[in-house]
Image (cartoon, rainbow, N blue to C red):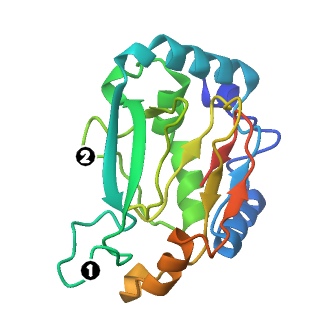
Amino acid sequence: MTLDEIVDMRAYPLSETGFLARCKAALDANGVLVLPGFITPPALTAMTTEAAEKQDLAYFCTQRHSVYLTPPNPDFPDDHPANTQVTSSKGCICDDAVSRTSPLRTLYDSTRFRQFVMATTGETQLHPYADPLSSINIHYANRGQELGWHFDNSSFAITLLIQKPDAGSRFEYIKDLRNADAGEMNYDGEAALLAGRTAPQVLGMDPGTLVL
């Protein structure tokens, strides 16, 4: 499949200046950009089929971690937000298990898609992962599994939903909860979130939706 067969270019003209400006403005204002129906139905079917056929190759694990994904900080008590542990339980297959002809790989390797991501995020350069296993991952979540609250270590993240759960599985986020570049971790705000005193925003997504 070519990129034009994978992405709905009528709805999302990746090379048009006006479209790129609107995407960047939305991401800057909201902290998230949601593009429903980004993937065409034939490409989505191919992605879903590949994921189903290779689920037996997935590695499943459960991990306890802090929201900051950092080691325990001895300067704070165990119940401090820097040390409070949440659970992430998931499975995934890594880049080496994704087919060389997969639409996911065509999308990832596409210069046009990379330029779209750069224009939207404001990054001046983007490069493939140095880790050959990390470029493309297919994430599996069965009943009872979840990703605990966390701050990503990267400056941005891209998620593509290829199958919708039968029930549950909310995608929750909070905008501007901390300013890591300034060293402001906002422990009080994080404590309020973990205690349920802060209501997160919830994204509704259907298969084929791209989220930055």
Depth check: 191 or 182 in front? 191
The residue labelled by disc 1 is 77
Give x and y (percent) for residue 114. Answer: 51, 48
Specify the quadrant that holds the N terminus.
top right
Please state if 35 lies on the left or on the right of 95 as rendered: right
Secondary element under disc 1, as helix, strand or loop, is loop
Depth check: 18 or 102 in front? 102
Badge 2 density bin: few <14, some 14–19, many ≥20, Cα 10 Å: few
Q: Which residue corresponds to the image point at 40% horizontal and 51% vertical from the top-left?
A: 87
Please state if 79 lies on the left or on the right of 143 as rendered: left
Badge 1 density bin: few <14, some 14–19, many ≥20, Cα 10 Å: few
Depth check: 141 or 14 in front? 141
Disc 1 residue type (three-letter):
Pro
Secondary element under disc 2, as helix, strand or loop, is loop
Is 188 above or below relative to 27? below
Give x and y (percent) for residue 80. Answer: 35, 78
The residue labelled by disc 2 is 130
Q: Which residue corresponds to the image point at 35% horizontal and 87% vertical from the top-left?
A: 183
Q: CA distance from mark 2 to mark 1?
A: 36 Å
- Residue 135, by quadrant, is top left
Mark closest to the chain's N terminus, 2 or 1: 1
Q: Which residue corresponds to the image point at 24% horizontal and 42% vertical from the top-left?
A: 131
Depth check: 184 or 75 in front? 75
Give x and y (percent) for residue 188. Answer: 48, 86
Is 99 above or below relative to 201? above
Specify the quadrant that holds the C terminus.
bottom right
